[in-house]
Image (tube, rainbow, N blue to C red):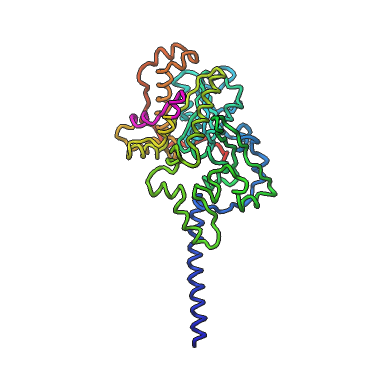
Amino acid sequence: MRRRRSVFAVLSLVAVVLVIETTGWLLGQQLGSRAVLYVAPASDGYASYLARRDPQLGWPPIDSIPGSGRDASGSRIVPAFPDRAATGECVALYGESFTWSSGVGSEDAWGNRLSRLLGCRVANYGVGGYGTDQALLRFRGHRADSSRVAILGFQPENILRNVNQWRYLLYADSPFSFKPRFLVGGDGRLELIPLPTVTAADYDRFAEAPERMLAHDYFAPGGLSGTVHLRFPFLLAVIPSVGHVHVRAALQSRPWYAEFYDPGHPSGALTVAGALLAAFHTEATARGQVPLVVILPNLQDLEMQAGTGRWSYQALLDRLAAAGVRVLDLGPGLLHALADSDPAVLFGATGHYSVRGCRVVAALVFGSLLEARLMAQASDPGVLAGSQQEPHYDDRADDQHQADEELPLIE
């Protein structure tokens, strides 16, 4: 009888452990899908990614993807002025998906609407998923840019991407997207860290412990971001996830990137972002262009400002002002345009600007360019002379438009 009880006790203990570990594993998989825990991805498709990716910027070559919605210059199609050879461009946009205007078609993209307001071509060289570092490198490499005004769009979440090299550690739906990044030296100069080189044969070994190769990725497992491997015992791996940046932000009801704007943050993300934007300002000026950094707030930023009276990115604005970088912060203008409306009306299902949001953004950028007389040498004087009134946008937008040319760069 005593032996039976012992066996029963052992089996009961095993059953309890199995239940606990199964629960831990299932919970870990859920957290892994949100990039809170690290779960190694499969290598299927990695060789294809290597064959297509840009050797410097990491994403697949943006000008060689059929149906990408770009013209021969690499710009998003500009319906208002489709022939670059005939007209040239007065303004060029660089940045990520908020600059590209993901979620709306080319006609409704804020760059195209700005073209119509200015009466000249606004080229859109934004690329979905880019960090500010990639946008700067794309600007540097695009020597054919003949615009008078060069705009670099900055969406506040980009502060994370600038201290990251493997997108999978930020967004777990992108297992093959590597990127370069910059470090800032003691003298303030930018040092380029090339994108990681992982062969197809080495990918599985890399994925087992990416921290061995990603010395400059703040989100590598085992680092200060709080990312840990999902390993047995699974429940013990899940428990530390309460310290992950995602979880901390959720508990504090703020955007998950807000803490990275703290000047003392261990990632140094604020210093990197400021240096990248200052470099753009300096280099565009040296090329004879007028540089303009445009802050493109998302819904979380507007909600945080409404709840706390503070912008998540205020420290960056202060740093850029001290460095003499020309900046247009669209946050106050977006709030003014909303009046008492729900901020969500400016954003579509993908989280990017809706048709209405793009109209507001275009009007705000247009008004800023006119107010600062930045376009005095770039567009028809008659257009400028007749456009000194308050920029107008139509708030009766039909937000049921379908995105006709989503750029398939992050797969």
Would residue 411 be visible to someone looking at this image? Answer: no
Q: Residue at x 50, y 47 (%)?
A: 224
Closer to the camera in the image, 14 or 303: 14
Q: Residue furthest bottom?
A: 1
Closer to the camera in the image, 114 or 333: 333
Q: Give the answer, above or below, for where 169 lies relative to 348.
A: below
Q: Give the answer, above or below, for where 132 lies relative to 3.
A: above
Q: Is residue 40 left or right of residue 160?
A: right
Q: Position of residue 182 (x, y in %)?
A: 57, 35
Q: Is residue 337 left or right of residue 168?
A: left
Q: Position of residue 21 (x, y in %)?
A: 50, 65
Choose top left, top right, bottom left or bottom right for residue 48.
Answer: top right
Q: Which residues are magenta?
A: 319-337
How many numbered tags mark residues here?
Answer: 0
- Tell me if residue 331 is in the magenta stretch: yes
- Tell me if residue 334 is in the magenta stretch: yes
Q: Residue furthest front?
A: 186
Q: Position of residue 385 (x, y in %)?
A: 41, 12
Q: Residue at x 52, y 21 (%)?
A: 81
Q: Residue furthest right?
A: 201
Closer to the camera in the image, 208 or 225: 225
Q: Give the answer, above or below, for where 128 lies relative to 34.
A: above
Q: Quadrant of the C terminus?
A: top right
Q: Residue at x 57, y 43 (%)?
A: 166
Choose top left, top right, bottom left or bottom right for residue 286.
Answer: top right
Would residue 192 be visible to someone looking at this image? Answer: yes
Q: Is residue 345 left or right of residue 244?
A: left
Q: Is residue 255 left or right of residue 87?
A: left
